[in-house]
Every structure is written in C-alpha cells, then in structure tokens.
Amino acid sequence: MPFEAVIGLEVHAQLSTRSKIFCSCSAAFGAPPNENTCPVCTGMPGVLPVLNRKAVEFTIRTALATSCTVQRRSVFARKNYFYPDLPKAYQISQYELPIALGGHIDIDAGNGTKRIGITRIHMEEDAGKLVHEGEFSGAQASLADLNRCSVPLMEIVSEPDMTTPEEGGAYLRRLRDILVYLGVCDGNMEEGSFRCDANVSVRPSGVKEFGTKVELKNMNSFRNVEKALEYEIRRQSEALEDGGQVVQETRLWDANEGRTVSMRRKEEAHDYRYFPDPDLLPLIIDEAWIEELRKTIPELPAEKIARLERQYGISRYDAALLASDRALADFFEASAAVFGGNPKTTANECIHWKDAVLARKLSPETIAHAVEDRERGTVSATASKKLVELVLSTGKPFRTLRDEQGLTQVSDASALDAVVEKVLAASPKEVESYRAGKAGLLSFFVGQVMKESRGKANPRVVQEVLKKKLG
Amino acid sequence: MANGSAHTWTLLEAARKVREKEISSQELTRALLDRIDALEPKVHAHITILREAAIAQAGERDRELAKGIERGPLHGVPVGLKDIFCTRGVRTTCGSRILHNFDPPYDACVTEKILASGAVLLGKHNMDEFAMGSSTETSFFGPTRNPWDLARIPGGSSGGTAAAVAAAMCFAGVGTDTGGSIRQPASLCGVVGMKPTYGRVSRYGMIAFASSLDQAGPIARTVSDAAALLGVIAGHDRRDSTSLDLPVPDYLAAVRRPVRGLRVGLPKEYYEGGGLSPEVREAVEKALKALTDQGAVAVDVSLPHTEYALATYYLIAPAEASSNLARYDGVRYGHRAEGAAGLIEMMSKTRAEGFGDEVKRRVMIGTYALSAGYYEAYYGKAQKVRTLIRRDFTKAFEAADVLLTPTAPTPAFRLGEKTGDPLTMYLSDIYTIPCNLAGIPGISVPCGLSATGLPIGAQLLSNHFREETLFTAAGAIERALPPPRTAPLEG
C-alpha cells in the first residue's frame, strides 16, 4: 500500500539584535560563560522584563516578508517549567495571541513552485545552556551558562503542507534565505541560530485524515532534517504496513546512527500552565508602524530569482544559485553592470568563485574583465582562470596581471599561420591520415599548435586555420 | 536627654529639624537606634537592623548638609523598608528561609528613590513570608507583635513596617499591598497606610508575589507624612513596563484642601456582612460624620460583585505567585538543600525546606488553577469576574469621589487566633482586596480606638490616579479625630 507523508515544520530563528529581548545585555554568541548576564536575565528576585523594540520590528518584518497578517494586539505568556537553564522557571513566549498569523512562502518543488502555508509567528526568549563536567553519563557536576538566556527568538510554524523530505528541505532553505535577506537572523544552523523541529505523519495515499504525528528534534543541518524525515517516513510506513501503529511521541534524530529514537510519549508531555505574563503589557502595533517597516523589506529570494532569470536571460538554476546569497546576487549584478556582454558566463564565474566573492576577496570588475576578455578572445579560458587565481594571491588588477604575464591570447589568424605551418610540417604522417579521412586527428593538431604557442593561441581560431590549411 | 522625644516627631518635623540643623542626622539616627534597642525585643518588627551602616549614612548626610548639599525632602531622616525591597549588599529575605542568605546585587527602584531623597535606611522590616498573610505570623523569622497590645498581631503582610512606625522605631516606612497588606496592618497598628494606583510606584526590585496586584506604598504616622513619602517613591520607571508615565502631583498640598462638596460613597455591600464588628462600624461612622461635618456629602453606592472578590483574589494571586516563586529552586541563589542525590531532588528538597506552609498552600492552589483542563474554570473565570469588579468601581465613582469603608472587619486579633484556619484569616482582607483587583488607590486612616484601646482604621478608595482626593479626605478625618502620636508602649 503506498503511503503519503504529511510534514509541518517549526523553526526557531534567533534574531540578530544587539541586545536581549527583555534586558540590555549583549545577545552576542561566544562570550565567556555568564558574561552577558544581569539581574533581569538571570531571574533575580523582583526584576522585570522590558520588551526590546528592535526584536519586535525584526519579527514584524519577517511577518510582512512571509505574507502574514501582523496582529494589532498580541500577548506575552509564561510557559512554566523547572530546569536549571531557565532561571525564572518560566519562559516568556507568545501563546494564544501571537504577533503574526496566516502567511505563506513559495518554494521550488519538482516541476514549478509550491505554496507552503505559515500558521503563525511568535516571539519568545531563549533559555541558557548546561555544560556537563566530564562525560554526560558520568558527569560529576553540571554548570549553567546563562549568556543565551533571553536572547530573542521567533518561532515560525508552517502548515502541514509538505509531503516529501525534499520539500521540507526546500522550505527551510527558502525560509532561511528570506531571514538572511531581511538581516533579522544569521541563519547559522550549526551554531543554533536557526533550528528546526518537524512534525511528520503518514497516511495511505488518497486518505484525507491525518495519521498519528511524531515530533522530531535535534536536527542541526538541512541535510539532517531531510535524512530524519526520510527515515521517519519509512519507519512509520513500515510500521503501518506490518499492521502496527504509530505512537504519538517526540523522537530525537541521532545523526551518527542515522535513525530516530523515542524521547517522550504524549502522556509524558508537560503541562506548561500558560497564562498571560502580568509583567508585560499587551503588545499593540499600529498601522503606521507596520507601513514604516514595510518600506524596509528588500527584494526577496523568489522575486530576485524570477527577475535575474528574466532580466539577464540566465537559467532558473543559475539564478537560484546566485540568489541563495544576497551578496552573491548583488555581486553578479554589479559585475554584469561593468560588462553585460555575456551574463551566462558572468553567472557561471560568480558561482565558480562564490567563496572568494563572499569573502570579499574579488571585485565585480575582476569577473567583468575576465568575462569580457574571454568574450573578445583576448584571453583563453585557462589563462582567465589562472589570472583570477593570481588576482586572489597578489591583489593586483586582472588586466595588469594579464599584460605582465603575457597571457594575452593570439586570435589573429595570420599571426598563427607560421605556427600551424610548423606543426603540419613536423607531422607528415598525421597530415596524410587526416586527409585520408581520419577527422579525429584535428584535435591532435590543435593540441600541437597550443603547445607550440605555449597556450597563447585561441583554440577556436587555430581550428579554423587548420581546417583551411588541411583542405 | 535633649533628644528624648525625637522619635515622636513626624517625618516632616524630623526632616525640617535636620534641614534647619536643630539636630544632626546622626543624633536622630542614634535616638531611633536607642528606641529600637528598647522595643525591638518586645515587638520584633525587624529582620535586619542596619546599625553601623545607618550611622555611617547619617554621618555622610550631615557632612553633605554642612556643605550645603541637600539630597531631597527626606535628607538625613531615618526610615525603614519592608524586607521585600531589594537593597544592594543588604540581605533581602522576603520573610522566607529560601532567601535567608540573599544579598541582592542591585537596589529596588523604591530603595533608589528613598536613598535619593536623602533618607537614612535604618532597617528591613519583618513581613509575612513572600507577603502571604494578614498577621506577619508566616514570617520565617518569627511573628511581629502589635505595639498596642503585644499579645496581638500587627496585621500583615507589612506588619513589621506598621509596627515599627506605630512604635516610633522609624519615622515612616514603605510597605507593599497585594490584597490589603499596607492598609490592614496600618489600621490594626493605628497608623496611615496608602496603596497607590497600580503602576504609580515602580515594582522594579520589589520581590513579586502577585504581579498584577502588587503595589508599594507609604506607611506613616500622619497623612501628611504618607503624602510626602508617596511623593518620593512615585513616578515612572522604564524598568517596569506596567509603571505609569504620568507626572507626580504635590500630594502634600492635597492634605489641607477642604472637603466641602466632596461626595463620599458608602458601598452598602461593605456594611451588610455579619463579620463587621460593631465597634469598627461605629468608628467608621464617626469618620463619616467628621467628613460631613466639614461639608462633604454622603451618598449610597453599590458594588454588586463584592461577594466574589475574595474568591477571585484567591485564584489570581496564587496563580501568579505559583509562577513568580518558581525561580527559587536553589540553583543560583538563596537556600539550597544539602545532600540531594540529583537535580530534581535538590530542587524539591530546597523548596520543601525553604518555603513555609502558607506559601506552599498558595503555590499549590495557583498551580492547580493554571493546570490544563482547569484554567478556564478557575483562572479564566477569575479574570472575567475581576473585570466586573473593576466596572463596579467605575460606576460607583460616577456618583462618588471617594468611598468610605472599614479597612478591616475587626481590631487586631490575638497571635495564633487564626493560624489554624486559613479561611478565617483570608476574611481579614475582605474590604481591602477589591481595591487591588480594580487597581485603584486606597488609604487607611485611624478613626478611633476600640473599648479595649485597640486602633481602628477607616478605608478610603478613589478612582485611578486620584490619590490626591484620598489625602484630602484622610486629612479631614485626621484633623477631626486626631489619633495618639505613637502606640502606648515604652521600653
């Protein structure tokens, strides 16, 4: 019996604000333990939270970029549970009345685009981190690092609109790209600033009702999310096929073993005793504020891909690769503005040199000159690549290096005549064979001419001259 | 001894005498420390007495004054704080074992403002544990006694502050009021206690009991002293999101305003119940007469949802408390149980040892009221009733400028009299609780003594931000029915 999967994703994105969500401590990653703390974020008696305006603005911008409706009134609630990394013993989060509802993003799926619904976006604070002395199982003590306490997060919950691991991966990548474009999150999954939990169930194809869902946690890369979904869909399908059942539970992805393991059953789930936080007033957002923030939304990945494709005539695939990073796409456009003669080659070069481009080691002019010189036949593909490498190692301009190194390509047919003559004279047997019909030998002659010219000859011109001379 | 009666001065008199150099701050401080030495063993109003620190602080105020520096209206005057306000480097216990060793690294906003006014901090006052109680008997540090009768309780939870002020161990103090914790002990100790509008005084650094109800306010021996002290501690604070960004009026100026034409509402529900002692009723009637004699007009009003206030309060306050008190887990500060085998055991033992019975009772009630499946029936319903109670007041204040009621149903009761029956204890706050639910200001002012010589207070309530009206009406009652300056207690 064929099964179909139903996947919904919950993303926790850390907002790149300078300070924490309810106090003025730095929200930066990597400080010595407990350095970025104060009485407020360590839950001392009597302290009170004050909401960070920037964090609200970042979330509103995310809501606008994902076509959500920003709620005029939202409410912070307390989620109560005991844990040593949670100093107040409650997390301030939004529960019944979140800041944004009902949006969507479009992803590339198989043949065309697919629209994935966004159920809600809400704001909350992060918890701290426990460091165990020695091995986890035999730890003598656990230490709490509260630097991360109260770092602002937004949780973005999707509708269960995805049916394959690939769609899940595409949604996450697109969402990450949107957040990075907005500058509201650095999108780093390994450092935990972009985290994903998945809800997945399976049902026989054609059936309308959802199957029993399982929540997956502990996936710290896009690839791991896809692998975990794949594993879990197979596990659930096999269980049903064998006449068994799927149990509602939370499972952890074990990346080393490549499987999911049960963490807790539904009946073990916490009662968080949510209630509105009396220390914070309802968050009221007026239309003027929303409109002001709407003006700050940049061109987003989907629009950019479509425009690059249309405006430069490049493939959708290349456009998507360029748009995967806003800086790369900007670089491409800057380069194409210097030389617009062959955008496809410019795109290929940008993608090829992506790491150097993103490390800001190359200027748009370098790529523009490289493409232009190749287009004009002034340098060969091989020489072009070598020259860009030299730009990277020496920092000198592309064309200065080209002239210094004498890597200009010879494309003048008459200038190549003598070399061609010399090669043909040196290989009478091959000339005979070629003329007898062994056309494959042409590449042999081209190779000989290139060797004789020490790579400076334009292979296309060489071919033409050879064909003419060989009759 | 020249300063033999210094402790009987009012806060404003003491401030004037220091300002005019009739007495130095250090002399004044020593006089009160002498008074504390004589009376503290009987009354036990303090958890921490700041002897050396207070004398040093007073010396500093004196040197400033010599240089012409006057910090503020309370320059050089010794005052006290309920031990619920964080004081940097000075142990702040909230009356609980779980914080018996807690030295805050920061000052509460109220502490900052008190110090900025030039006042000298003399001590941290005893209180019911986490402000949960009406008698100061739930304190981990033992009960405080009523200076008017040492066999009786001073009221609570700000019982230490009310007793210290009544026994003239300080010129005034700041307490907190979640369901009557300033007004009820003020009434039982024969002093003035004011709970301002919710948000008038910053809650920053004031240890939370029930966040949507807690409010700090002055306890003093005269209405003018209370008005002056509220002027010092009130004001906007950006560290408290529920703090009001409104200018602070001259409360002192309001005390002497005439009450002619003031509409005094008498909510009938407050006079109907069987629990009201005839003596208290009689005293409050005298207060009414004092007002009408000066030209105020009595009007009958109704607050129909009053009977639900106690039940509403005992769902909302414990619910918030169960969450507010969850942070005391032994991980970062305060008491930590010895010898626990693991994390959960450490937290459980710490809380079992660190909290007293009343706190545990309320944490359990609150946890239950917020639980899945019960939330709507309890907490959700209580919030709805709270709205109805608030509307009752809005409507009543269309007909009246102030409401006059008893503060407490009876004068001070005996130690141990109600500790075995929490419900009876809860009923001592029946007249004060609705005010907190509505967020409006209220004041208790002395209006007479019982046959056995115990103080009785009258409560005045007004609409949001109308503290001035309360001071005006309370001032008129005080002028007509002047109470004894201090409790009849000598060392």
Image (spheres, coloured by chain):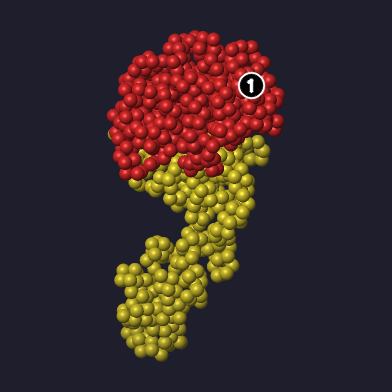
Chain colours: A yellow, B red
Residue at image location 43% in from the left, 31% down from the top: B13
Classify mark 1: residues with Cα within 10 Å, few (<14), some (14-19) or many (20+).
Answer: some
Can residue A66 be seen here?
yes
Residue at image location 42% in from the left, 84% down from the top: A411
Q: Quadrant of the C terminus of chain B?
A: top left
Q: Nearer the viewer, residue B222 or A110?
A: B222
Report x, y in % for residue A471.
46, 87
Q: Nearer the viewer, residue B317 or B247?
A: B247
Report x, y in % for residue A398.
37, 75
Task: Identify the residue under disc 1.
Answer: B289
Q: How many marks?
A: 1
Q: With respect to residue A249, does A115 lie above or below?
A: below
Q: Amino acid at mark 1?
A: Lys
Residue at image location 61% in from the left, 55% down from the top: A291
Can residue B390 be seen here?
no
Where is residue A97, by image quadrant?
A: top right
Q: Nearer the viewer, residue B443 or A338?
A: B443
Judge from the rendering whether residue B413 lies leftward or rightward of residue B23; answer left or right: right
Report x, y in % for residue B187.
52, 20
Report x, y in % for residue B89.
33, 33
Residue at image location 45% in from the left, 77% down from the top: A372
Q: Quadrant of the N terminus of chain B?
A: top left
Where is residue A163, by image quadrant?
A: top right
Q: With respect to residue B81, does B353 lie above or below?
A: above
Judge from the rendering whether residue B197 lies leftward or rightward of residue B334; answer left or right: right
Q: Nearer the viewer, residue B76 or A285?
A: B76
Q: Chain of mark 1?
A: B
Where is residue A112, by image quadrant?
A: bottom right
Label 1: element kind:
helix
